[in-house]
Image: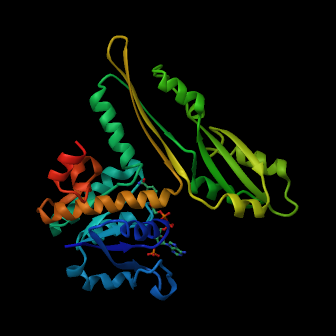
Amino acid sequence: MSIRIGIVGYGNLGRGVETAIRLQPDMELVGVFTRRDPAQVATGGAAVFALDSLADRRDDIDVLVLCGGSKSDLPEQTPELAARFTVVDSYDNHGQIPQHFAAVDAAARAAGTTAVISTGWDPGLFSINRLYGEAILAQGETYTFWGRGLSQGHSDALRRVPGVAGAVQYTIPAEHAIERVRAGEQPELTTREKHDRQCFVVLEDGADAEQVREAIVTMPDYFAPYDTTVTFITAEELARDHTGMPHGGFVIRSGASSPGTTQTIEYRLQLDSNPEFTASVLVAYARAAARLAAAGDHGAKTPFDIAPGLLSPKSAAELRAELL
Ligand code: NDP
């Protein structure tokens, strides 16, 4: 029997989940559940329902994939919905994950549901690779580099600078720093040494380019701690060249198994679309969540708690024969 999925929230990630489910042999999409007027939400074909109508759908949904924002949607929605459904979310506010876990765990245990939180790629696949690195190379250093990737938060910060009509920001991992890590040097790297920030900015009519540049590169927290370049472009160039949402990065563990014997583990993602990839990860974890729920393994889980075989549509016997 197919795993019946509901999507809660239809933004970039929700759209990605709709696309990803079509590629899965054992899943069917029940529909999208939104806080907005369903008539105003245009999907790629999925039925759209009001979020409130979930109250009546308990028996025809196996897993809800929660696609709200981490800032204010998921802290409320995940515990609330875990009290009624098995759920998966991509909560990415790293510093608050323990609190989020505790709130979701209490709701899921009380209700007898399973809730996989903080999956995706970071947190998610990168977290698992940091764990493998530390566990296997007990002595060493772990490095995470992000990019080349579009940063939504930094792009928003640029758009708030007076004189800016439109802008995007890319985070670029510093090639020199990556080479030193790959060479086994285990360097101590400052924030400035690890990543650069590249800004593409459209000026408002009459704005002073030099003033705008200065306001950007000196912005505390966002740009001042980094080497930041600002390139002024036209609105046409922004629309033509900067609408994608690429991202990716590296997790590198560099260690020594005995004096002078360097061992390096590297995991790399290069993504044309951050939301479509994150959605693909969520969908694989939805399969694991459905299986855990069916087996009576309830409560909150993170990617650290999920056995890899549960992510695959193949049986354990097929996996042993084909991939081991
Ligand atoms: P969006 O801002 O596109 O969507 C968030 C929510 O906003 C939607 O669920 C939707 O809820 C609402 N919304 C979307 N579009 C509109 C609109 N036009 N008007 C009004 N409301 C709208 O966020 P993303 O999908 O890009 O990202 C969601 C979260 O995914 C991020 O906050 C981030 O935390 C997480 N993420 C995690 C990653 C990981 O590796 N773990 C990687 C990437 C992202 P509704 O339909 O109910 O209105």
Question: Is residue 213 shown above or below 62?
Answer: above
**Which quadrant of the structure image shows residue 301?**
bottom left
Q: Residue furthest right?
A: 206
Q: Is residue 306 visible?
A: no
Q: Residue at x 17, y 64 (%)?
A: 293
Task: Kindly identify the residue that appears in the image at 23 percent across and 80 percent down.
Answer: 60
Residue at the outermost bottom position: 39
- Looking at the image, which residue sits at the far top? 259
Q: Residue 269 location in percent, x, y?
A: 46, 45
- Residue nearer the viewer, 283 or 88: 283
Between 26 and 33, which is closer to the camera in this rendering? Answer: 26
Q: Is residue 167 left or right of residue 64?
A: right
User: What is the x, y in percent for residue 34?
Assistant: 42, 79
> Where is residue 306 shown, x and y percent of the image?
23, 51
Can the viewer see residue 244?
A: yes
Asked which quadrant contains residue 47, the reply is bottom left
Quarter that holds the C terminus? top left
